[in-house]
Amino acid sequence: MNGRKEDRRLPPETAAATSRDAAAVTGRTAGVTTETNVVSSGPNGAMISVRDLRKKIDKEEILRGVDLDVAVGETLVIIGRSGGGKSVLLKNLIGLMRPECGEIWIADQNIIGMSERQLGSVRQKVGILFQSGALFDSMTVEDNIAFPLIEAGMRNPNSVRTRVNEVLEVVELEGENAKMPESLSGGMRKRVGLARAIIRQPSCVLYDEPTSGLDPVVSDSINRLIRRLQHRFGMTSIVVTHDMKSAAKVGDHIAYLHEGRIYFYGTPDELTRCQDPIIQDFLQGRSESTER
Ligand SMILES: Nc1ncnc2c1ncn2[C@@H]1O[C@H](COP(=O)(O)OP(=O)(O)OP(=O)(O)O)[C@@H](O)[C@H]1O
Ligand SMILES: [Mg+2]
């Protein structure tokens, strides 16, 4: 993480998180979203449901009413301009940041207002691969990966090692237990971060830029790994990425975060065909229209 102090206070108004907007959510119909795209999922059926999520940092409104559903076993890709709030959104989803208002449903639990202890059990369901990797430099690969298990109270060294070896196999890093993070390549660091994200057998993984800074071949292997976790374990995933190739490869749906809201939601094909100028500017990497 970036080392800046996270906002851990829960404003009193959070308790008044509304369900009145639950009907006016981002639809599953492709296209630029409007408040009329009504879906009935959310707490009923979706693995992750977000309703009217609002988050300010230093008086700046970063998230301005995010509505989102991720079905069980699907991979949702979130794209959007740099600084637009994608990482902030992921951190809210696991309670590392607390929103001003809104609802975040992980399966059948609304995590808003939960204590740190309750959040601990949510984090067992939801693993996260941080944008920076966030490995502890002074710990071996094995200790980095084992960290969430130890924190959760698993003390038997044999059981810990067995689990570590299992996830090392999943990320194709068997035998690298004793290496220190500094001796790993970028792709290996991402894999170690991923192994740590899945060690507690979550049903959901959030990936923040899993392929950034990696060459196309390594990126492709990470994409295949994300798909494999989906197929092998039925994992529900959110992947934040700038890598459109990767988005098309792993995403069942793609959501475009723009000015603090989900501006577009659809399949990768529907995104490519979308003629909306803001979407087209983003896809073509054009800066003119937004700078006017
Ligand atoms: N811990 C923090 N303290 C202060 N400001 C923050 C913090 N985290 C994020 N921000 C601010 O919130 C905004 C959104 O940041 P965020 O990291 O979510 O963007 P992003 O969409 O993930 O960008 P990128 O694609 O570059 O990773 C930025 O203006 C950023 O400076
Ligand atoms: Mg980010």
Image (spheres, helix red, strand yellow):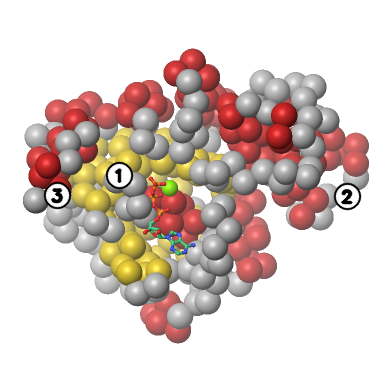
In the image, residue 3 lies at what x, y percent?
58, 58
Residue at the (33%, 62%) spot, across then down: 63
Mark 3 → mark 2, Cα distance in angstroms: 55 Å
Secondary structure under the numbered disc 2 in the rendered image: loop
Local packing at callout 2 (Cα closer than 10 Å; few below 14, some 14-19, many 20+) is few
Q: Tags 1 and 3 in contact by the CB under 8 Å rule?
A: no
Residue at the (84%, 35%) spot, across then down: 161
Residue ID for mark 1:
80
Residue ID for mark 2:
155
Local packing at callout 3 (Cα closer than 10 Å; few below 14, some 14-19, many 20+) is few
Label 3 vs label 2, nearer the camera: 3
* Visible residue check, residue 201: no
Mark 1 → mark 3, Cα distance in angstroms: 16 Å
For marks 1 and 2 on the same chain, the one whose residue lies earlier in the sequence: 1
Mark 1 → mark 2, Cα distance in angstroms: 41 Å
Local packing at callout 1 (Cα closer than 10 Å; few below 14, some 14-19, many 20+) is many
Residue ID for mark 3:
291
Q: Residue furthest bottom?
A: 12
